[in-house]
Image: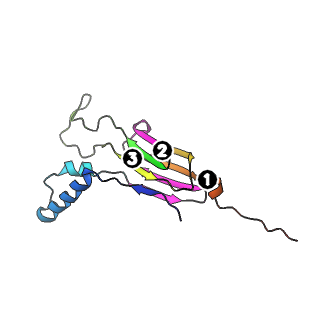
Amino acid sequence: MKTITLHRPNAIHNALSDFDRYFESFFGDSVLGPASRALNRMPAVDVRETEKGYVLEMDLPGHDEKDIDIHVDGSSLSIASRHEDAGKTVDEERGAWLIRERRISPFSRSFKLPENADPEGISAEFRNGVLCLEVGKKPEAQKRTIQINAR
């Protein structure tokens, strides 16, 4: 069975995550605290295969469709956010943040599409904080029924 594969490049946040877990195991809470948790925030993704293609659903609460970039380059599907106020400590309209645990952090995720996926047949929908991508299969890869002719 051919499936969509998650591409996870090695990055600093992986090392910080391991470091954070190491300290939590000894001291109960990380020295890095909320800063390291913010680095590890990757949106949850569900991928399923249907008869006609693949469906990818990604949780993106707090985002608008204008904040999301989706690109296909060959067999690589990339989804990224470019949320404008991710690092602001003061909101001119609402004042300075005293506690901000619900910050929306920018992210980037890549997926390797299977050989039978049709990069031209991708549609996207964003509703209630969930991004839904439908990736169609190439026509020759879709299941079809063969009729038997009687002689």
Circle 1 residue: 138
> Which structural element holds mark 2?
strand
Residue in the picture at 15% in, 56% down: 30
Disc 2 marks a residue whose amino acid type is Asp
Residue 73 marker? 2
Disc 1 marks a residue whose amino acid type is Lys
> Which structural element holds mark 3?
loop
Report the Cα–Cα distance between label 3 and label 1: 28 Å
* Residue at the extreme right of the image, as rendered: 151
State the image coordinates of residue 53 (x, y, percent, origin top left).
Answer: 57, 55
Residue in the picture at 50% in, 46% down: 74
State the image coordinates of residue 47 (x, y, percent, origin top left).
Answer: 47, 57
How are the colours assigned in the image? rainbow
Residue 89 marker? none
Residue in the picture at 36% in, 38% down: 82
Is residue 66 rendered to the left or right of residue 97? right
The crowd level at tag 2 (other Cα within 10 Å; few <14, some 14-19, many 20+) is: few
User: In which quadrant will I find the C terminus?
Assistant: bottom right
Q: Which residues are magenta?
A: 44-72
Is 18 one of the magenta-colored residues? no
State the image coordinates of residue 92 (x, y, percent, origin top left).
Answer: 24, 28
State the image coordinates of residue 41 (x, y, percent, origin top left).
Answer: 30, 51
Disc 3 marks a residue whose amino acid type is Leu
* Residue at the extreme top of the image, as rendered: 92
The crowd level at tag 3 (other Cα within 10 Å; few <14, some 14-19, many 20+) is: many
Is 61 one of the magenta-colored residues? yes
Circle 3 residue: 60
Question: Foreground mark, 3 or 1?
Answer: 1
